[in-house]
Image: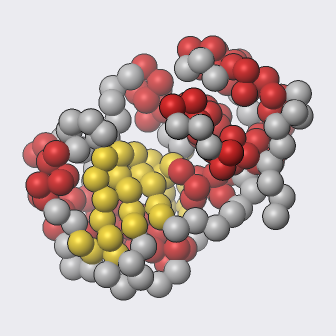
Amino acid sequence: MTETELLKDCLTRLNRTGVAYLVTGSMASNFWGIPRTTHDLDFAIQLPPSQVSIVVRAFADHFHIDESAVRAAYQPPYQFNAIDHRSALKVDFWLPVNTPFEREMFRRRQQCTMFGIPAWIATAEDLILHKLYWDRLTPSERQRTDAAGVYRVQRGNLDLDHLKRWADELRVRPVWDDILENRLRPKLT
């Protein structure tokens, strides 16, 4: 199973559950920006405790997913994963921490079609901000160059006021300015 096939499978499963989610991480940056290889999928998921069993059942047939680990995700680091038995690829699920930015990111998510499957995805602006925020927490050239790649591809379509406001609030303005001034460029290979 390829990463694309796994994404399609996960989207189909999530859509059936009715749980609010959005595609984030490298698959979202591939959608909005310059594609690169990845070895996992990332979803932010709003998961009320009453729906934990629904999500576990939705993935149980072809994934290793531990219900106790899902329930533990309501505490830091607010994450659980599912391992696909067919490919050994990992799917990371992140529970929003209820910060103003994460609430805004979910409010602004967009519906699209990814490889023929309906999907909810972080906006290009919020993906840039999210990658820069993660880079601030755990410095990573990959996060910065993904953000620069999304900017390069989407620059004429972006809400720059939204980006500036949240870059200041998330304290990522210096790196955002580097992207704007072309001092930070995406990897093109």
For this rendering, which residue is in front, 180 or 76?
76
Q: Is residue 38 left or right of residue 156?
A: left
Instruction: Name the residue rendered at 63%, 14% in the picture.
Output: 168
Q: Is residue 65 left or right of residue 106?
A: left
User: In the orientation shown, which residue stands out farthest toward the front?
Assistant: 139
Displayed quadrant of residue 30: bottom right
Residue 123: x %, y % from top left: 59, 40
Relative to 89, residue 144 above or below? above
Relative to 88, residue 139 above or below? above
Displayed quadrant of residue 99: top left
> Residue 160, can we see it?
no
Instruction: Name the residue rendered at 13%, 59% in the picture.
Output: 67
Instruction: Name the residue rendered at 18%, 54% in the picture.
Output: 69
For this rendering, which residue is in front, 142 or 116?
142
Displayed quadrant of residue 91: bottom left
Residue 22: x %, y % from top left: 44, 48
User: In the orientation shown, which residue stands out farthest toward the right?
Assistant: 182
Q: Quadrant of the C terminus?
A: bottom right
Residue 173: x %, y % from top left: 69, 19
Relative to 136, residue 127 above or below? below
Instruction: Name the residue rendered at 16%, 63% in the picture.
Output: 66
Q: Is residue 81 left or right of residue 3?
A: left
> Residue 74, can we see it?
yes
Residue 9: x %, y % from top left: 40, 73
Q: Is residue 6 left or right of residue 96?
A: right
